[in-house]
Structures are given as C-alpha cells and as structure tokens.
C-alpha cells in the first residue's frame, strides 16, 4: 500500500510479491535483523499457480538458506486487490 493506504501494483503479482519482501526487509532492519535470521516463512496467496511462476525470486532474498515454509492458497485476503501476504519469524540473538 502507498503512504495514503491505497493498494499499489494492482493486478501485478510479481510486483506485489517484491513489495511484500521490500516491506519485510524494512521491518527486519528496524529490529537489526535480516533475511539471514528468518526461520519461518508463511505465504498466503489467492493464486498459487501465479506464485509458483515467480517463486524463484526468493533466491534473491534468501542467500544463505531457505527457512521452513508453508505456501497456502486462500480464497481471499483483507482487500480484493491483495494477491499475496508473507509472514516471517526471525531468530535474533540478543
């Protein structure tokens, strides 16, 4: 979503997925973490075939390992324009 709360990249699955990872990267950095510390990744999507088409993008995100993951096809997400949601868990040493 943009700064005003409007959906962006409407209908563009690949860009929506990239935007999700970009937003997650910001959250991880805020907590002084990175994708290297991610241990669980859950992906919820309204279009599994489209996700599988672009799943290779994840190799640009996870450079040292792939976390345990679940890829779930769902009927709908919070807004009709949403095509994908990504939930992460990271293990950060104190």
Image: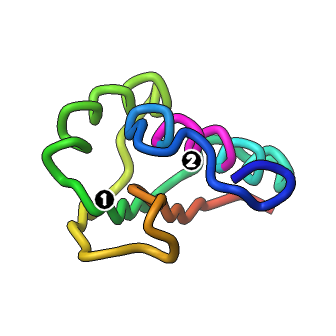
Expressed as whole percent of the image width and height from the top left, the position of residue 71 reads 25, 60
Q: Which residue is mark 1?
A: 69
| Residue 79 in the figure: left or right of residue 92 | left
Give the mark nearer the N terminus: 2 vs 1.
Answer: 2
Inspect the magenta stretch and tell me whether residue 75 lies in it. Answer: no
Q: Secondary structure at mark 2?
A: helix
Closest to the observer: 67 or 75?
75
- Residue 75 located left or right of residue 49: right
78 up-or-down from 92: above or below: below
Q: Is residue 39 left or right of residue 50?
A: right
Majority secondary structure of magenta residues: helix
Question: What is the x, y in percent for residue 86?
Answer: 47, 59
User: Which residue is painted at 32% across and 58% down in the image?
Assistant: 68
Picture coordinates of residue 82, whole percent (x, y): 47, 60
The color scheme shown is: rainbow
Say the numbered circle drawn on residue 91.
none
Q: Which residue carries the number 2 mark?
A: 20
Residue 20 among those drawn in magenta: yes
Residue 36 visible? The answer is no
Residue at coordinates 71% horizontally, 57% vertically from top-left? 6
Q: Considering depth in this image, is 38 or 13 the residue closer to the camera?
A: 13
Name the residue located 56 percent from the left edge and 47 percent from the top edge: 20
Which residue lies at the image location 44% right of the left edge and 67% below the top edge?
Answer: 80
Q: Crowdedness of circle 1 by 10 Å Cα count: few (<14), some, many (20+)? A: few
**Span highlighted in magenta in the image:** 17-23
Of badges 2 and 1, nearer the viewer stands: 2
């Amino acid at each position: 979503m943009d700064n005003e709360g409007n959906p962006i990249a409407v209908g563009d699955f690949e860009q929506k997925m990239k935007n999700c990872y970009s937003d997650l990267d910001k959250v991880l950095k805020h907590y002084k973490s990175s994708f290297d510390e991610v241990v669980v990744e859950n992906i919820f999507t309204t279009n599994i075939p489209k996700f599988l088409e672009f799943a290779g993008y994840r190799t640009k995100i996870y450079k040292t390992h792939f976390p345990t993951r679940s890829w779930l096809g769902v009927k709908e997400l919070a807004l009709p324009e949403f095509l994908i949601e990504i939930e992460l868990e990271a293990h950060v040493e104190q």
